[in-house]
Structures are given as structure tokens and as C-alpha cells.
Image: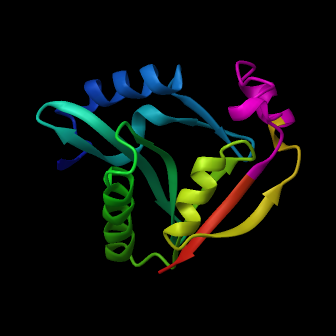
């Protein structure tokens, strides 16, 4: 596995990956519409095939992971990408890394807690607001769980 920084050279392929896996390049987080096409990040490659992607932004002394995808679960791809973001956050002297996931994303909730993240905040019924910005957000998520809340996790550096 080779991890590469998102750059001008691979941006088009990264954006195609995002569109394929997220169905759009727009993300809503805490009521903010975020253009994923301009985020920093890292891609994990097997030869020339992307097998994982993490995007993030750094602001205000913290780093926020915006998306994390691994096409090879339980093979260390997600962990390796998180570690790369942690290195970048430490270089930028961030005090913490934070991220948001939804209440239906049981696998992510488990994944992040096992890697040192802790639940920090619950944004109750926040997806009602998110759907006003992005109506394509479904009513039901993983395991047919109603998509209603955003959960913020953080990890101190």
C-alpha cells in the first residue's frame, strides 16, 4: 500500500472516487455545505487503484477529518490514513483531531473509538437542517436506522 498526498496530479481521480462513493462532492457537516473537491487529504493506493481516502481541513488550532473511506476493511488502510492525518495535524501544531459521523454509522463509531477518539458532542436532530442544504440525504441509513443526529468525536494530540 502506497499513501499519496492529494495533489493537482491526482485530484481528478480523487474527485471521481468521491463522486462514486459519496454520490456527490458536497457534504453537509453541522449545517455547513462543504466542497470536498478542494479538501486536503491522502489516498491509499494498491498500484494505481485507490483503496482508501481521507480528507481533512485544518483551522483554529484543530484538524477536522471530513471523510474516510476504506475499500479494504480490517487491513489497516483506514488506520494508516488516520495516522497520516495525525502526523499532518501535529506538524501544524493542532491540539486535537475531530470528526463527525451520523448516528447510523455503527462501524465508524466502533472504528474511531478503538483508535483513541472519544464522543465529544451530539448534534441532536441536525440532519433535519442538513437536508435543507442537501435534500438527497436519505431518511434511513445503515441497518435501516433513521438518520437523525451527528456525533462529534475528538482525539487530543
Left or right of residue 111, residue 88 in this image: left
Residue in the image at 29% along x and 37% along y: 51
- Picture quarter containing residue 91? bottom left
Please tell me whether residue 94 is drawn above or below residue 1 in the rendered image: below
Residue in the image at 38% along x and 52% along y: 78
Q: Position of residue 37 (x, y in %)?
A: 42, 32
Q: Which residues are magenta?
A: 128-150
Left or right of residue 75, residue 96 in this image: right
Left or right of residue 70, residue 133 in this image: right
**Closer to the camera in the image, 113 or 60:** 113
Query: Is 37 within the magenta?
Result: no
Residue lying at the far left in this picture: please name it. Answer: 47
Query: Is 133 within the magenta?
Result: yes
**Closer to the camera in the image, 30 or 54:** 54
- Specify how the rendered protein is coloured: rainbow
Q: Position of residue 28 (x, y in %)?
A: 66, 37
Q: Position of residue 27 (x, y in %)?
A: 60, 34
- Picture quarter containing residue 152? bottom right
Amino acid at each position: 500500500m502506497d499513501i499519496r498526498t492529494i495533489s493537482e496530479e491526482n485530484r481528478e481521480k480523487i474527485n471521481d472516487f468521491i463522486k462514486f462513493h459519496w454520490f456527490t462532492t458536497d457534504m453537509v457537516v453541522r449545517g455547513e455545505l462543504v466542497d470536498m473537491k478542494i479538501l486536503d487529504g491522502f489516498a491509499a493506493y494498491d498500484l494505481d487503484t485507490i483503496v482508501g481516502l481521507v480528507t481533512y481541513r485544518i483551522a483554529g488550532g484543530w484538524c477536522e477529518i471530513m471523510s474516510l473511506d476504506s475499500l479494504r476493511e480490517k487491513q489497516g488502510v483506514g488506520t494508516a490514513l488516520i495516522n497520516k492525518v495525525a502526523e499532518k495535524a501535529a506538524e501544524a501544531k493542532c491540539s486535537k483531531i475531530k470528526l463527525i459521523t451520523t448516528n447510523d454509522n455503527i462501524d465508524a463509531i466502533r472504528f474511531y473509538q478503538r483508535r483513541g477518539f472519544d464522543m465529544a458532542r451530539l448534534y441532536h436532530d441536525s440532519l433535519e437542517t442538513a437536508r435543507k442544504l442537501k435534500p438527497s440525504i436519505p431518511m434511513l441509513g445503515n441497518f435501516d436506522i433513521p438518520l437523525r443526529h451527528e456525533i462529534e468525536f475528538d482525539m487530543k494530540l
